[in-house]
Image (cartoon, rainbow, N blue to C red):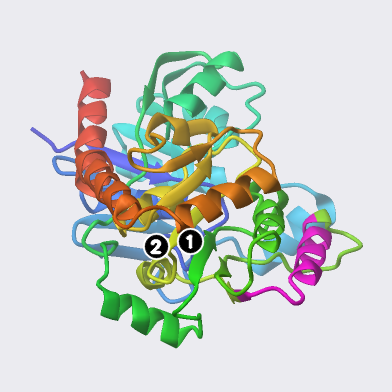
Amino acid sequence: MSVPSVLMLSQEVHPIPPLKGAAVEQWIDTVAHRVSGYVPHVVSVPHPALPDSQVVDGVRYQRIRVGALYNRLFRKITRLDPWSYVDRIVAYAESVEPDIVHVHNAPQLVPRLKAGLPGARLLLHMHNEKPVQSLPEIEVLCGCSRYISDWFRRQGVRAGRFVQLPNGVDVAAFHPGDANARAAARARFDVPRERFVVLYVGRISPEKGPDLLVEAVRRLDPRRFHLVLAGEWPQGDPRRSARVVFAESLRARLAGMPVSVLGHFAPGAMPEIYRLGDLLVVPSRFEEPFSMVAIEAMASGLPVLALAKGGMKEYLADGENALVLPAEADAAALAAAVESAAGAPTGRLAAMAREARLLVESRFTWAHVARATERLYREMLQ
Protein backbone atom coordinates (compact mmCIF):
# COMPACT_ATOMS: atom_id res chain seq x y z
CA MET A 1 0.00 0.00 0.00
CA SER A 2 1.44 3.37 -1.04
CA VAL A 3 2.08 6.09 1.52
CA PRO A 4 -0.31 9.03 1.00
CA SER A 5 1.26 12.36 0.03
CA VAL A 6 0.34 15.85 1.19
CA LEU A 7 1.03 19.09 -0.67
CA MET A 8 1.52 21.91 1.86
CA LEU A 9 1.62 25.49 0.61
CA SER A 10 0.96 29.10 1.50
CA GLN A 11 0.89 32.47 -0.22
CA GLU A 12 3.50 33.78 -2.63
CA VAL A 13 5.26 35.77 0.11
CA HIS A 14 7.72 33.99 2.43
CA PRO A 15 10.13 31.14 1.72
CA ILE A 16 10.02 27.94 3.72
CA PRO A 17 11.81 27.63 6.09
CA PRO A 18 11.07 31.29 6.87
CA LEU A 19 13.83 33.85 7.32
CA LYS A 20 11.92 35.80 9.98
CA GLY A 21 8.86 35.38 12.17
CA ALA A 22 6.42 34.20 9.49
CA ALA A 23 4.14 32.10 11.69
CA VAL A 24 2.25 30.38 8.86
CA GLU A 25 5.39 29.25 7.05
CA GLN A 26 6.91 28.19 10.37
CA TRP A 27 3.82 26.03 11.02
CA ILE A 28 4.15 24.36 7.62
CA ASP A 29 7.86 23.64 7.98
CA THR A 30 7.64 22.36 11.54
CA VAL A 31 4.62 20.11 11.05
CA ALA A 32 5.94 18.74 7.74
CA HIS A 33 8.94 17.36 9.63
CA ARG A 34 6.80 15.89 12.43
CA VAL A 35 3.89 14.14 10.72
CA SER A 36 4.34 10.42 10.21
CA GLY A 37 2.61 8.15 7.74
CA TYR A 38 2.56 10.79 4.98
CA VAL A 39 4.98 12.12 2.36
CA PRO A 40 5.04 15.92 2.72
CA HIS A 41 5.67 18.15 -0.29
CA VAL A 42 6.28 21.75 0.80
CA VAL A 43 5.84 24.47 -1.82
CA SER A 44 6.97 28.08 -1.40
CA VAL A 45 8.71 30.98 -3.10
CA PRO A 46 12.50 30.64 -3.54
CA HIS A 47 14.82 30.73 -0.55
CA PRO A 48 17.94 32.90 -0.92
CA ALA A 49 20.20 30.26 0.65
CA LEU A 50 18.62 26.97 -0.44
CA PRO A 51 18.06 25.16 -3.77
CA ASP A 52 14.71 25.24 -5.53
CA SER A 53 14.32 21.44 -5.24
CA GLN A 54 15.47 19.74 -2.07
CA VAL A 55 14.72 16.76 0.17
CA VAL A 56 15.46 17.17 3.89
CA ASP A 57 14.69 14.32 6.30
CA GLY A 58 11.94 12.99 4.06
CA VAL A 59 10.32 16.39 3.38
CA ARG A 60 10.33 17.37 -0.29
CA TYR A 61 10.70 21.09 -0.92
CA GLN A 62 9.71 22.66 -4.22
CA ARG A 63 10.39 26.38 -4.44
CA ILE A 64 8.57 28.10 -7.29
CA ARG A 65 10.80 30.61 -9.06
CA VAL A 66 9.10 33.34 -11.07
CA GLY A 67 11.77 35.16 -13.09
CA ALA A 68 12.43 38.89 -13.05
CA LEU A 69 11.62 39.22 -16.77
CA TYR A 70 8.27 37.47 -16.30
CA ASN A 71 7.42 39.70 -13.35
CA ARG A 72 8.32 42.87 -15.22
CA LEU A 73 6.67 41.98 -18.53
CA PHE A 74 3.48 40.33 -17.35
CA ARG A 75 2.74 41.41 -13.78
CA LYS A 76 3.98 45.00 -13.85
CA ILE A 77 3.58 46.15 -17.45
CA THR A 78 0.66 44.19 -18.92
CA ARG A 79 -0.93 43.20 -15.58
CA LEU A 80 -1.35 39.69 -16.96
CA ASP A 81 -0.23 36.46 -15.30
CA PRO A 82 -0.50 33.66 -17.89
CA TRP A 83 1.79 31.23 -16.00
CA SER A 84 1.00 32.23 -12.42
CA TYR A 85 2.35 30.97 -9.12
CA VAL A 86 -0.70 28.75 -8.63
CA ASP A 87 -0.47 27.43 -12.23
CA ARG A 88 3.10 26.37 -11.49
CA ILE A 89 1.98 24.71 -8.25
CA VAL A 90 -0.65 22.71 -10.16
CA ALA A 91 1.97 21.63 -12.71
CA TYR A 92 4.24 20.40 -9.91
CA ALA A 93 1.34 18.73 -8.09
CA GLU A 94 0.32 16.83 -11.23
CA SER A 95 3.75 15.18 -11.17
CA VAL A 96 3.45 14.04 -7.54
CA GLU A 97 -0.32 13.36 -7.40
CA PRO A 98 -0.98 14.45 -3.80
CA ASP A 99 -3.79 12.81 -1.87
CA ILE A 100 -4.35 15.97 0.19
CA VAL A 101 -3.71 19.61 -0.68
CA HIS A 102 -3.23 21.58 2.54
CA VAL A 103 -3.55 25.29 1.67
CA HIS A 104 -2.54 27.78 4.34
CA ASN A 105 -4.02 31.28 4.44
CA ALA A 106 -4.47 31.51 0.66
CA PRO A 107 -8.17 31.19 -0.24
CA GLN A 108 -7.44 32.97 -3.54
CA LEU A 109 -5.56 29.86 -4.71
CA VAL A 110 -8.37 27.42 -3.95
CA PRO A 111 -10.47 27.71 -7.17
CA ARG A 112 -7.49 26.95 -9.41
CA LEU A 113 -6.21 24.16 -7.16
CA LYS A 114 -9.62 22.52 -6.92
CA ALA A 115 -10.11 22.67 -10.69
CA GLY A 116 -6.58 21.54 -11.52
CA LEU A 117 -6.32 18.74 -8.94
CA PRO A 118 -9.78 17.13 -8.87
CA GLY A 119 -8.49 13.88 -7.37
CA ALA A 120 -7.06 15.47 -4.22
CA ARG A 121 -8.82 16.28 -0.97
CA LEU A 122 -8.62 19.99 -0.26
CA LEU A 123 -8.02 21.45 3.20
CA LEU A 124 -8.11 25.25 3.56
CA HIS A 125 -6.31 26.19 6.77
CA MET A 126 -6.88 29.80 7.81
CA HIS A 127 -4.72 31.67 10.30
CA ASN A 128 -6.41 35.08 9.79
CA GLU A 129 -9.66 36.63 8.67
CA LYS A 130 -9.56 37.09 4.88
CA PRO A 131 -12.05 37.80 2.09
CA VAL A 132 -13.48 34.63 0.56
CA GLN A 133 -15.58 35.77 -2.40
CA SER A 134 -16.24 33.14 -5.08
CA LEU A 135 -14.80 30.31 -3.00
CA PRO A 136 -16.03 26.90 -4.19
CA GLU A 137 -17.22 24.30 -1.71
CA ILE A 138 -14.29 22.58 -0.01
CA GLU A 139 -13.84 19.42 2.01
CA VAL A 140 -12.52 21.04 5.21
CA LEU A 141 -12.14 24.59 6.51
CA CYS A 142 -9.66 24.57 9.36
CA GLY A 143 -9.03 27.53 11.66
CA CYS A 144 -6.08 28.13 13.97
CA SER A 145 -8.76 28.72 16.63
CA ARG A 146 -12.48 28.19 17.05
CA TYR A 147 -12.86 31.95 16.64
CA ILE A 148 -11.40 31.78 13.11
CA SER A 149 -13.39 28.70 12.07
CA ASP A 150 -16.61 30.32 13.27
CA TRP A 151 -15.74 33.57 11.50
CA PHE A 152 -15.47 31.83 8.12
CA ARG A 153 -18.63 29.87 8.74
CA ARG A 154 -20.42 33.19 9.30
CA GLN A 155 -18.99 34.49 6.00
CA GLY A 156 -20.90 31.77 4.20
CA VAL A 157 -18.00 29.48 3.34
CA ARG A 158 -19.29 26.09 2.20
CA ALA A 159 -17.30 23.24 3.69
CA GLY A 160 -17.97 19.64 4.55
CA ARG A 161 -16.43 20.22 7.99
CA PHE A 162 -15.24 23.12 10.11
CA VAL A 163 -12.40 22.14 12.45
CA GLN A 164 -9.46 23.61 14.37
CA LEU A 165 -5.72 22.99 14.33
CA PRO A 166 -3.87 25.29 16.73
CA ASN A 167 -0.43 26.79 16.39
CA GLY A 168 2.39 25.21 18.32
CA VAL A 169 5.54 26.03 20.20
CA ASP A 170 8.86 24.26 20.68
CA VAL A 171 8.85 23.76 24.45
CA ALA A 172 12.48 22.65 24.40
CA ALA A 173 13.57 25.98 22.89
CA PHE A 174 11.03 28.16 24.70
CA HIS A 175 11.42 27.32 28.38
CA PRO A 176 11.71 29.20 31.66
CA GLY A 177 15.18 30.64 32.17
CA ASP A 178 16.95 30.97 35.49
CA ALA A 179 18.05 34.27 37.03
CA ASN A 180 21.45 34.06 35.35
CA ALA A 181 19.94 33.61 31.89
CA ARG A 182 17.61 36.55 32.42
CA ALA A 183 20.45 38.75 33.68
CA ALA A 184 22.62 37.79 30.71
CA ALA A 185 19.83 38.64 28.25
CA ARG A 186 19.27 42.05 29.83
CA ALA A 187 22.99 42.76 29.82
CA ARG A 188 23.27 41.86 26.15
CA PHE A 189 20.44 44.19 25.10
CA ASP A 190 21.26 46.90 27.65
CA VAL A 191 17.94 46.54 29.45
CA PRO A 192 18.00 47.71 33.10
CA ARG A 193 18.14 44.79 35.55
CA GLU A 194 16.57 46.64 38.47
CA ARG A 195 13.33 47.71 36.76
CA PHE A 196 10.09 45.87 36.06
CA VAL A 197 10.32 45.22 32.32
CA VAL A 198 7.15 45.33 30.22
CA LEU A 199 7.73 43.44 26.97
CA TYR A 200 5.94 43.85 23.64
CA VAL A 201 6.64 41.37 20.82
CA GLY A 202 5.00 41.78 17.43
CA ARG A 203 4.58 43.95 14.36
CA ILE A 204 4.57 47.68 14.91
CA SER A 205 1.17 48.25 13.34
CA PRO A 206 -2.12 49.83 14.49
CA GLU A 207 -4.13 46.64 14.91
CA LYS A 208 -1.52 45.18 17.28
CA GLY A 209 -1.94 48.13 19.67
CA PRO A 210 1.67 49.05 20.51
CA ASP A 211 0.58 52.69 20.83
CA LEU A 212 -1.95 51.65 23.50
CA LEU A 213 0.87 50.05 25.47
CA VAL A 214 3.15 53.07 25.01
CA GLU A 215 0.44 55.36 26.39
CA ALA A 216 -0.06 52.98 29.32
CA VAL A 217 3.65 52.91 30.19
CA ARG A 218 3.73 56.72 30.01
CA ARG A 219 1.43 56.70 33.04
CA LEU A 220 3.84 54.56 35.09
CA ASP A 221 6.78 55.62 37.25
CA PRO A 222 9.84 55.71 34.91
CA ARG A 223 12.09 54.87 37.86
CA ARG A 224 10.33 51.51 38.33
CA PHE A 225 9.24 50.45 34.83
CA HIS A 226 10.98 49.91 31.51
CA LEU A 227 9.37 49.13 28.14
CA VAL A 228 10.93 46.83 25.52
CA LEU A 229 9.54 46.84 21.97
CA ALA A 230 10.66 43.87 19.87
CA GLY A 231 9.10 43.79 16.44
CA GLU A 232 9.30 44.79 12.81
CA TRP A 233 8.78 48.47 12.04
CA PRO A 234 7.22 49.27 8.64
CA GLN A 235 9.52 50.91 6.12
CA GLY A 236 8.76 53.14 3.16
CA ASP A 237 7.35 56.47 2.13
CA PRO A 238 4.91 57.93 4.69
CA ARG A 239 3.09 59.67 1.85
CA ARG A 240 2.09 56.25 0.54
CA SER A 241 1.73 54.17 3.68
CA ALA A 242 -0.54 54.76 6.67
CA ARG A 243 1.46 52.12 8.55
CA VAL A 244 4.67 54.08 8.11
CA VAL A 245 2.89 57.23 9.33
CA PHE A 246 1.71 55.28 12.38
CA ALA A 247 5.22 53.98 13.08
CA GLU A 248 6.80 57.42 12.77
CA SER A 249 4.20 58.88 15.12
CA LEU A 250 4.81 56.10 17.63
CA ARG A 251 8.57 56.56 17.50
CA ALA A 252 8.13 60.27 18.21
CA ARG A 253 6.04 59.44 21.27
CA LEU A 254 8.87 57.34 22.68
CA ALA A 255 11.05 60.41 23.23
CA GLY A 256 12.04 60.68 26.88
CA MET A 257 10.50 57.33 27.85
CA PRO A 258 12.35 54.45 29.55
CA VAL A 259 12.28 52.21 26.47
CA SER A 260 14.45 49.85 24.45
CA VAL A 261 13.58 49.45 20.74
CA LEU A 262 15.04 46.19 19.47
CA GLY A 263 13.54 45.63 16.01
CA HIS A 264 12.70 42.11 14.83
CA PHE A 265 14.58 38.83 15.10
CA ALA A 266 14.81 35.47 13.38
CA PRO A 267 12.70 32.73 15.03
CA GLY A 268 15.76 31.09 16.58
CA ALA A 269 16.62 34.24 18.53
CA MET A 270 13.21 34.67 20.13
CA PRO A 271 13.68 32.50 23.27
CA GLU A 272 16.26 34.98 24.55
CA ILE A 273 13.96 37.95 23.85
CA TYR A 274 11.28 36.55 26.17
CA ARG A 275 13.89 36.37 28.96
CA LEU A 276 14.08 40.17 28.92
CA GLY A 277 10.60 40.71 30.37
CA ASP A 278 8.86 40.50 33.70
CA LEU A 279 5.51 40.71 31.91
CA LEU A 280 4.49 40.26 28.28
CA VAL A 281 1.61 42.49 27.18
CA VAL A 282 -0.59 41.67 24.17
CA PRO A 283 -2.52 44.95 23.64
CA SER A 284 -4.18 44.01 20.33
CA ARG A 285 -7.06 46.16 19.12
CA PHE A 286 -8.26 43.57 16.62
CA GLU A 287 -9.53 40.06 17.28
CA GLU A 288 -6.31 38.06 17.54
CA PRO A 289 -6.77 34.83 15.57
CA PHE A 290 -4.55 32.91 18.00
CA SER A 291 -1.38 34.78 19.12
CA MET A 292 1.84 32.86 18.75
CA VAL A 293 3.48 35.48 20.95
CA ALA A 294 1.24 34.61 23.89
CA ILE A 295 1.94 30.87 23.84
CA GLU A 296 5.67 31.40 23.26
CA ALA A 297 5.77 33.64 26.33
CA MET A 298 3.72 31.13 28.34
CA ALA A 299 6.11 28.34 27.36
CA SER A 300 9.01 30.60 28.40
CA GLY A 301 7.64 31.09 31.90
CA LEU A 302 6.86 34.76 31.23
CA PRO A 303 3.52 35.99 32.65
CA VAL A 304 1.08 37.31 30.04
CA LEU A 305 -1.30 40.27 30.24
CA ALA A 306 -3.72 40.48 27.31
CA LEU A 307 -6.97 42.02 26.21
CA ALA A 308 -9.77 39.47 25.75
CA LYS A 309 -9.59 39.23 21.97
CA GLY A 310 -10.36 36.51 19.44
CA GLY A 311 -8.77 33.11 19.82
CA MET A 312 -6.81 34.06 22.94
CA LYS A 313 -10.02 33.82 24.96
CA GLU A 314 -10.03 30.07 24.28
CA TYR A 315 -6.94 29.39 26.37
CA LEU A 316 -6.21 32.43 28.58
CA ALA A 317 -7.91 32.25 31.99
CA ASP A 318 -7.73 35.42 34.07
CA GLY A 319 -5.95 34.92 37.38
CA GLU A 320 -5.10 31.30 36.57
CA ASN A 321 -2.65 31.23 33.68
CA ALA A 322 -2.71 34.90 32.62
CA LEU A 323 -4.04 38.35 33.37
CA VAL A 324 -6.93 39.22 31.05
CA LEU A 325 -8.54 42.64 30.63
CA PRO A 326 -11.85 43.45 28.92
CA ALA A 327 -11.54 43.79 25.16
CA GLU A 328 -12.29 47.54 25.29
CA ALA A 329 -9.69 48.35 27.99
CA ASP A 330 -7.99 51.72 27.50
CA ALA A 331 -4.49 52.94 28.35
CA ALA A 332 -5.47 53.84 31.93
CA ALA A 333 -6.84 50.35 32.58
CA LEU A 334 -3.78 48.77 30.99
CA ALA A 335 -1.44 50.90 33.09
CA ALA A 336 -3.33 49.96 36.26
CA ALA A 337 -3.09 46.26 35.38
CA VAL A 338 0.66 46.48 34.77
CA GLU A 339 1.17 48.34 38.05
CA SER A 340 -0.93 45.76 39.88
CA ALA A 341 1.10 42.92 38.38
CA ALA A 342 4.36 44.57 39.41
CA GLY A 343 3.09 44.99 42.97
CA ALA A 344 1.55 41.53 43.30
CA PRO A 345 2.58 39.37 46.27
CA THR A 346 5.76 37.38 45.80
CA GLY A 347 5.00 34.19 43.95
CA ARG A 348 1.68 35.17 42.38
CA LEU A 349 3.10 35.82 38.91
CA ALA A 350 5.40 32.83 39.24
CA ALA A 351 2.46 30.53 40.05
CA MET A 352 0.52 31.91 37.08
CA ALA A 353 3.53 31.34 34.82
CA ARG A 354 3.82 27.73 35.98
CA GLU A 355 0.15 27.11 35.15
CA ALA A 356 0.68 28.70 31.74
CA ARG A 357 3.64 26.46 31.01
CA LEU A 358 1.60 23.37 31.97
CA LEU A 359 -1.18 24.48 29.62
CA VAL A 360 1.22 24.81 26.71
CA GLU A 361 2.75 21.42 27.46
CA SER A 362 -0.69 19.80 27.48
CA ARG A 363 -2.16 21.46 24.37
CA PHE A 364 0.25 23.43 22.21
CA THR A 365 3.48 21.52 21.72
CA TRP A 366 4.39 20.78 18.11
CA ALA A 367 4.03 17.09 18.92
CA HIS A 368 0.36 17.68 19.87
CA VAL A 369 -0.20 19.72 16.70
CA ALA A 370 1.41 17.08 14.47
CA ARG A 371 -0.70 14.26 15.96
CA ALA A 372 -3.86 16.32 15.52
CA THR A 373 -2.89 17.01 11.90
CA GLU A 374 -2.33 13.29 11.26
CA ARG A 375 -5.79 12.50 12.67
CA LEU A 376 -7.38 15.10 10.42
CA TYR A 377 -5.58 13.73 7.36
CA ARG A 378 -6.76 10.18 8.19
CA GLU A 379 -10.33 11.36 8.56
CA MET A 380 -10.17 13.18 5.22
CA LEU A 381 -8.86 10.12 3.40
CA GLN A 382 -11.48 7.85 4.95
- As drawn, 37 above or below 159: below
Please give left or right for residue 345 compared with residue 263 in the image. left
Question: Mark 1: few, some, or many residues within 10 Å (few <14, many ≥20)?
Answer: many
- As drawn, 154 above or below 242: above
Question: Which image quarter is the N terminus in?
Answer: top left
- At 46% across and 52% down in the image, what residue appears? 341
Find residue 125 and report its image quarter. top left
The residue tagged 2 is 17
The residue range painted magenta reads 243-260
- Could you say which is closer to the camera, residue 244 or residue 346? 346
- Could you say which is closer to the camera, residue 124 or residue 256? 256
Question: Which image quarter is the C terminus in?
Answer: top left
- Is 248 inside the magenta-drawn segment? yes
Kindly give the residue lying farthest to the right in the view shown.
239
- As drawn, 344 above or below 188: above
Looking at the rendered structure, the kind of residue marked 2 is: Pro
Please give left or right for residue 45 compared with residue 211 in the image. left
Residue 166 can be seen in this image: yes
Give the overall secondary structure of the magenta segment.
helix
Looking at the rendered structure, the kind of residue marked 1 is: Gly
The residue tagged 1 is 21
